[in-house]
Image (tube, helix red, strand yellow):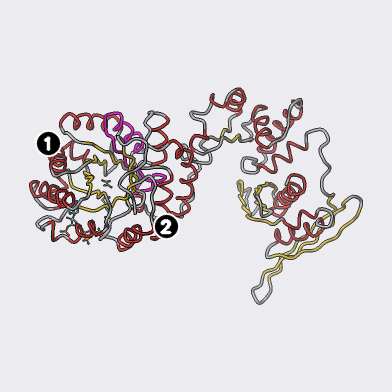
Amino acid sequence: MATDSPTAVSTDFHVFDTTLRDGAQREGISFSVADKLATARLLDEIGVGYIEGGWPGALPKDTEFFARARSELKLRHAVLVAFGATRKAGVRVEDDPQVRALLDAETPVVCLVAKSDVRHVREALRTTLEENLAMVADTVAHLVSHGRRVFLDCEHFFDGYAADPDYGVAVLRAAFGAGAEVGVLCDTNGGMLPMGVARVVADVRSRVEGRLGIHCQDDTGCAVANSLAAVEAGVTHVQGTANGYGERAGNADTFALVANLVTKMGLPVVPPECLAELQRVSHAIAELANIAPDDHQPFVGASAFAHKAGLHASAIKVSPELYNHLDPAVVGNDMRILVTEMAGRASVELKGRELGVDLEGHADAVGRVVDQVKVLEAEGWSFEAADASFELLLRSQLPGAPAPLFELESYRTTVEHWANGVVMSEATVKVHVDGERIISTGEGNGPVNALDNALRQALVSRYPRLADVSLADYKVRILGWKGGTSATTRVLVDTTDGVGEWTTVGVHDNIVEASWHALVDALTYAVRHR
Ligand SMILES: CC(=O)SCCNC(=O)CCNC(=O)[C@H](O)C(C)(C)COP(=O)(O)OP(=O)(O)OC[C@H]1O[C@@H](n2cnc3c(N)ncnc32)[C@H](O)[C@@H]1OP(=O)(O)O
Ligand SMILES: CC(=O)C(=O)O
């Protein structure tokens, strides 16, 4: 069970994560209870102050989550929060089963959602403005009298404030008057921009005593910016979700919020040692949500500190700070240099350093590699994701580069479709190793698999390391049709030796030949560099 005494550094500031409630409202996410428990543990590792676990009483899974959390969830930093609505209109708070379920969740904190826009009160709740205020006050007071700390999410606060600012203020006063600790201003429809958010927050602060919070949906792509503008204007409670998951376009991304608050605004909202966990936790939660991580996500994406332009690399060679807004290690990420057609000599030198290849005194080789990469990329090759092929290319230009593993005489591969529906492939390779002619055949479920088996069998007695190597993944991309079935094909092969993985690339008009190039690089890399 969560403790009520978070160890987060700043007790004056709340980072409140709602991945398990609003994040779960994203199309395509369906957390199991086990997923929710695992996600809560991960969020705790980044040191957020509060974790909203779901809506007990509304979703059976969430009711079970809170029941299991009592014995299974040991949080070091965060306080667990149950979410729910104020009592229904015309119903005594003691008689409202949803409010009862909130108490039964036994969390130290409850976050209530309430209407704060007159249109919503009249048209969605179909009740009076007075009754809505009573619903807020009664529910807060009831929960407080049962020992709960209460935060109030004021739904549609900004839209409501534009229509009738006094009513938004009245809702906040009703909540604070009944004992609520935080009044959260919600941009529920996500239509705000930072300037408007800052104006409203400043205005509300001048009219209401009490801690204010912010909850921003991302419909204008400004959820993080809006939240930071609200902080600048004085809120001290910020809500977000892991990777920005949430209803429609999502919410403010907790990872960007935390990183910005700590590193840009100087607010120690999480313990210092937690910041370096952001990237790992972001990816782990993406796995649990079954959503591919966004490589381009600020701070934590795999490409967030990846540099492709040659001019960037030339400055980074002097000092990484010249083209990085932050040391990536601060948030657990890494800088990467991409060598592509946009590379220059500095890109190759930095990539060499990253790969552990000493290029000191080899300016000519570096220049040749830059030229070759540009020519090859124009033909459809791409080394961005194929570090192993790039390393082989780089080393091939250095003095004393080893000879190829073998000389190819020929290869052949066939596909057989039998009447019983079985499809099998067979391959024969003829190669020369140290003057010896080797002929080998292999079978497989496809021509590339058969070729791989035949080639490894031909080479394994000379290169025993290949016994431990196998294909892990195979990706094909067709690069522009030339009419009919003719096209350039790019193949990426991931290979593993059970310890690590490396990626190689091949390009040709013929898919088997493209695969052959990638396979040969994969095996050469295994023998020479693993
Ligand atoms: C902005 C947000 O994202 S808030 C979070 C929203 N999350 C969810 O909706 C996910 C979980 N929701 C659910 O499981 C269901 O919608 C439930 C259980 C909450 C409600 O389901 P139902 O009881 O079938 O009601 P239904 O969805 O048709 O209507 C909601 C009722 O709550 C009332 N209501 C809506 N907001 C509030 C509120 N803030 N306070 C009190 N009552 C409210 C509505 O007036 C309506 O009342 P009615 O039954 O008297 O017409
Ligand atoms: C509470 C909430 O999720 C919203 O207003 O968007």
- In front of the other: 238 or 154: 238
Quadrant where the N terminus sits is: bottom left
Which corner quadrant of the image does residue 440 belong to? bottom right
| Image spot of residue 82 (x, y percent) | 28, 53
Percent position (x, y) of residue 169? 14, 37
**93 shown above or below 129:** below
In the rendered image, residue 235 lying in the magenta stretch gets the answer yes
Between disc 2 and disc 1, the foreground one is 2
Determine if residue 205 is in view.
Answer: yes
Q: Position of residue 70 (x, y in %)?
A: 33, 58
Q: What is the magenta range?
A: 222-248
The amino acid type of the residue labelled 2 equals Asp
Q: Which residue is mark 2?
A: 35
First-in-chain label (2 vs 1)? 2
463 or 420: nearer the viewer: 463
Q: Residue at x 89, y 56 (%)?
A: 437
- Please determine whether, in this image, residue 5 is positioned above or below residue 9: below
What number is the disc on residue 166?
Answer: 1
Judge left or right: residue 256 versus residue 460: left
Q: Can residue 155 be seen at all in this image of the molecule? A: no
In percent of the image, x 70 and y 43: which residue is there? 389
Contact between marks 2 and 1 (CB within 8 A): the answer is: no
Secondary structure category for the residue under label 1: helix
